[in-house]
Amino acid sequence: MNPQELKTIMGSGLLSFPLTDFDSNGDFNKKGYVERLEWLAPYGASALFAAGGTGEFFSLTGDEYPGIIQTAVDTCRGVVPIIAGAGGPTRFAIQCAQAAEKAGAHGILLLPHYLTEAGQEGLAAHVEAVCKSVKFGVIVYNRASSRLKPDTLAGLAERNPNLVGFKDGVGDIEAMVAIYQKMGDRFAYLGGLPTAEVYAAAYKAMGTPVYSSAVFNFIPKTAMDFYHAVANDDMATQHRLLKNFFMPYLDLRNRTPGYAVSIVKAGAKIVGHDAGPVRAPLTDLKPGEMEELKALIATLGPQ
């Protein structure tokens, strides 16, 4: 797939991040991962991000990463495109990007580097080094320590034709509008705040109608229903689901840092698609919190 085809896919529907399956010892569970992808693929997501944020990319080793991406590509070939997560230090991000390209992924989502602060010049050098290491499409994730300004993005886009997507995980409306006005249709845009459904209508108004859904991992039907409600400006359905599910869900998610991932694994376990425990430093939900989530999911009906 060439970069422009990846750009088209990004603008064509809901995207999601499958969980990465671990066994009771915390090791990659290939069989469980294949079964998860086979379960989710037919629900209608336009692409799946393998080893992304919800897939705990930040906890994966360089040795196990290529096998996870290869498993996703092989399982979903001809059914749904696979975009691989990549990130961390520049040289590690390049290793991931090249492994994903070799495995046959359709592109990468470049997650932020970690810990070290950097200015715009350094951030641009990081993104450009990854872009130039591969031929397929790159989507940059604007979040945490990696926040790119409009002029930085414009320069990167001019020098790197395969930089075709921008995912926002910051939620700064002024900055997002400035980026969209600067870049126009040069990029495909993706809403990427945790539990993106809560922000979906606002992002659509800014020219970003597509987002990635984490809850697709355990309530795929509801996730697709909400996406279609946003696409069709069905405010009644949006407000009903926000009030009855998403806002109580946020209250539970926000109790402990890192629960944005942990609660998704908990939800998958509740609906019968257990992905195993999260890896440290994340922590799993407590038993009482599992019961709260179970009751909340039950209000949605069959998925």
Image: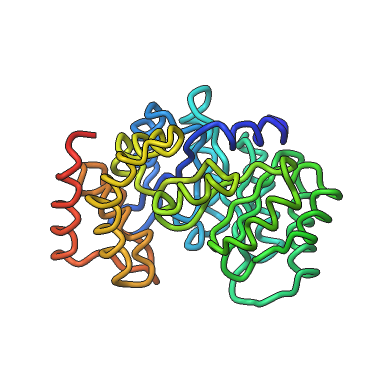
Out of 96 and 293, give the one closest to the viewer. Answer: 293
Where is residue 102, by image quadrant? top right
x and y percentages locating residue 301 in the rendered image: 17, 37
What residue do we see at 78% from left, 57% from top?
Answer: 129
Q: Is residue 19 above or below residue 228?
A: below
Position of 26 compared to 92: left or right? Answer: left
What residue do we see at 15% from left, 45% from top?
Answer: 298
Position of 1 compared to 219: left or right? Answer: right
Where is residue 282, by image quadrant? bottom left
Q: Is residue 101 above or below residue 270?
A: above
The C terminus sits in image quarter: top left
x and y percentages locating residue 19 in the rendered image: 39, 48
x and y percentages locating residue 69 in the rendered image: 53, 42
Q: Count the labels in the image.
A: 0
The scheme the figure's colours follow is rainbow
x and y percentages locating residue 226 in the rendered image: 36, 39
The N terminus sits in image quarter: top right
Residue furthest top as drawn: 78
Out of 28 and 13, give the one closest to the viewer. Answer: 13
Q: Is residue 119 above or below residue 168?
A: below
Out of 6 and 107, give the one closest to the viewer. Answer: 6
What residue do we see at 15% from left, 59% from top?
Answer: 292
